[in-house]
Image: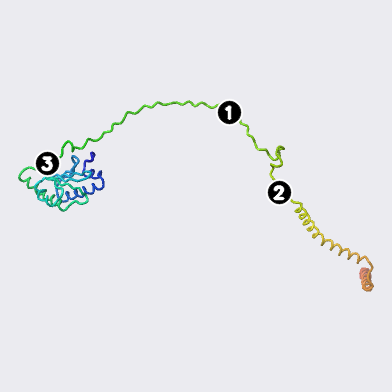
């Protein structure tokens, strides 16, 4: 039973899944078959009223009970149903997966017709009379009052002031550094080993440099030898085969010199004759 549920929908919402499905199927069948009934939630039961309570449906942990307000209708179907409680005018369903909805629908329709016939001749039973018939204690069935939570008084917390005392400056700490390579305290064994050039590599470098110098200077010496040979051949005595050539060259040079000297003299004589 849900103490805070005021409607059937809210009551169904708070039920476990298996109980919610079974009760919802019966509730929807009653609303569909008994047109004009009013649905309400009282005493932890789903009430359906037609000029007074007509049905009440209760769901517990292990069973579901349908209370019927017309005992004469239930007597006609007690041979077809199991779990009929004649002393309480109710039907008990233990297996929620096997609810005979077809038979219940006939009971609902016949109950509506019986209620309307009773209203024509007399009055319908009151809620108090039906609670006695269904053996429901009104006081026990009432929903407990809602729980009101009263807020507790706020606790007064004292503020604790913590004084922060500044720390005294500490003496400077000398930092010991590792000795450098120039430190005389450094031993020869602790110094890093430097790879030295071997004696075999040095002569190779020197010989390569000298070979390159000798190669560049060699052509110069050959050219110098050629020029000196030419000069020496020019200054030295000529061969007997070249003497006639040199004599003819000397004669031609002398003839040119005399011709050059005579040409201005002829021009001057021509000018004089032209002036006379």
Where the C terminus falls, by quadrant?
bottom right
Q: In this view, does 141 lie above or below 104?
A: above
Query: Comparing marks 2 and 1, which lies closer to the viewer?
Result: 2
Coordinates of residue 84 in the picture (x, y in percent): 14, 47
Query: Comparing marks 1 and 3, which lies closer to the viewer?
Result: 3
Query: Considering only order in the chain, which callout, 1 or 2, is on the residue closer to the N terminus?
Result: 1
Query: Considering only order in the chain, which callout, 3 or 1, is on the residue closer to the N terminus?
Result: 3
Task: Residue under label 2, please give it.
Answer: 195
Coordinates of residue 270 in the picture (x, y in percent): 92, 71
Quadrant of the rendered image containing residue 236 = bottom right
| Label 3 secondary element | helix
Q: Can residue 155 be seen in this view?
A: yes
Task: Residue under label 3, please give it.
Answer: 133
Please give the count of numbered marks on the rendered protein: 3
Distance of mark 2 from mark 3, alpha carbons?
A: 116 Å
Coordinates of residue 196 in the picture (x, y in percent): 73, 49
Point out which mark residue 274 bears.
none
Where the N terminus falls, by quadrant?
top left
Task: Residue under label 1, please give it.
Answer: 170
Q: Can residue 276 be seen in this view?
A: no
| Residue 218 or residue 61, whichever sits in front | 61
| Residue 10 or residue 142, whichever sits in front | 142
């Amino acid at each position: 039973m849900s103490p805070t549920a005021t409607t059937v929908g809210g009551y169904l919402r708070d039920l476990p899944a298996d109980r919610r499905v079974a009760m919802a199927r019966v509730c929807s069948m009653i609303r569909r078959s008994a047109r004009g009934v009013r649905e309400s939630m009282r005493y932890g039961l789903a009430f359906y009223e037609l000029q007074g309570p007509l049905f009440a449906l209760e769901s517990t942990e292990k069973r579901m009970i349908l209370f019927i307000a017309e005992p004469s209708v239930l007597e006609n179907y007690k041979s077809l149903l199991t779990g009929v409680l004649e002393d309480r005018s109710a039907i008990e369903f233990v297996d929620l997966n096997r609810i005979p909805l077809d038979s219940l629908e006939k009971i609902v329709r016949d109950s509506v017709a019986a209620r309307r016939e009773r209203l024509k001749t007399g009055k319908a039973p009151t809620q108090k009379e039906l609670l006695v018939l269904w053996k429901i204690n009104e006081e026990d069935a009432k929903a407990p009052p809602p729980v009101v939570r009263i807020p507790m008084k706020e606790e007064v917390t004292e503020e604790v002031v913590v004084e922060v005392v500044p720390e005294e400056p500490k003496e400077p700490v000398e930092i010991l550094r590792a000795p450098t390579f120039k430190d005389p305290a450094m031993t020869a064994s602790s110094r890093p080993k430097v790879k030295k050039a071997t004696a075999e590599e040095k002569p190779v470098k020197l010989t390569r440099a000298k070979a390159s110098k000798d190669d560049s200077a060699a052509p110069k010496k050959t050219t110098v030898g050629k020029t000196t040979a030419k000069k020496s051949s020019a200054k030295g005595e000529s061969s007997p085969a070249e003497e006639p050539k040199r004599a003819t060259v000397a004669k031609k040079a002398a003839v040119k010199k005399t011709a050059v000297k005579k040409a201005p003299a002829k021009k001057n004589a021509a000018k004089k004759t032209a002036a006379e």
